[in-house]
């Protein structure tokens, strides 16, 4: 399902959306690793970077629409 969403978003050919798709794909890979590769450690730096990327994604690239 994620792949379909990413491909749909890529159709817009907007640089911010392309950056958002790249970040979403990267964050998904990190989440899968953290959830399923339990033998691997996740550094605090990696956690902080993922949080910063998610905040950038939500606040800068894909901010919520203004109320009508």
Image (cartoon, rainbow, N blue to C red):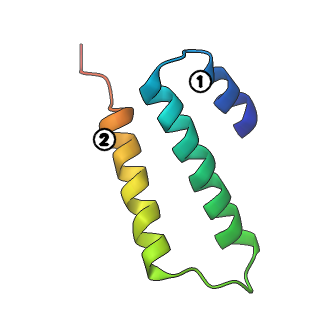
Q: Quadrant of residue 35?
A: bottom right
**What's the distance in space between the residues labelled 2 and 1, CA to CA?**
18 Å
Return the mark for residue 63: none
Is residue 23 placed above or below 17 in the rendered structure?
below
Q: Quadrant of the C terminus?
A: top left
Q: Quadrant of residue 39?
A: bottom right
Q: Quadrant of the N terminus?
A: top right
Task: Decide if residue 21 is on the left or right side of residue 35.
Answer: left
Give me the residue at 73% from left, 81% from top: 38
Callout 1 crowding tier (Cα within 10 Å): few <14, some 14–19, many ≥20: some
Q: How many marks?
A: 2
Give me the residue at 70% from left, 39% from top: 2
Give me the residue at 63% from left, 53% from top: 28
Label 2 vs 1, first from the N-terminus: 1
Callout 2 crowding tier (Cα within 10 Å): few <14, some 14–19, many ≥20: few
Is residue 67 placed above or below 5 in the rendered structure?
above
Is residue 2 visible in this depiction of the protein? yes
Towards the viewer: 19 or 31: 19
Is residue 1 visible in this depiction of the protein? no
Q: Position of residue 57 (x, y in %)?
A: 40, 43
Secondary structure of the residue carrying tag 1 is helix
Q: For the residues labelled 2 and 1, say whether their Cβ atoms are less than 8 Å apart.
A: no
Task: Decide if residue 55 is on the left or right side of residue 12.
Answer: left
Give me the residue at 56% from left, 36% from top: 21
Q: Position of residue 22 (x, y in %)?
A: 56, 41
Q: Which residue is mark 1?
A: 9
Q: Position of residue 19 (x, y in %)?
A: 48, 36
Secondary structure of the residue carrying tag 2 is helix
Return the mark for residue 59: 2
């Amino acid at each position: 399902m994620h792949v379909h969403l990413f491909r749909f978003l890529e159709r817009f050919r907007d640089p911010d959306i392309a950056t958002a798709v790249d970040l979403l794909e990267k964050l998904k890979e990190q989440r899968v690793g953290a959830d399923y590769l339990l033998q691997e450690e996740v550094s605090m730096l990696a956690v902080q970077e993922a949080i910063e990327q998610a905040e950038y994604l939500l606040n800068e690239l894909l901010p919520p629409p203004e109320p009508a």
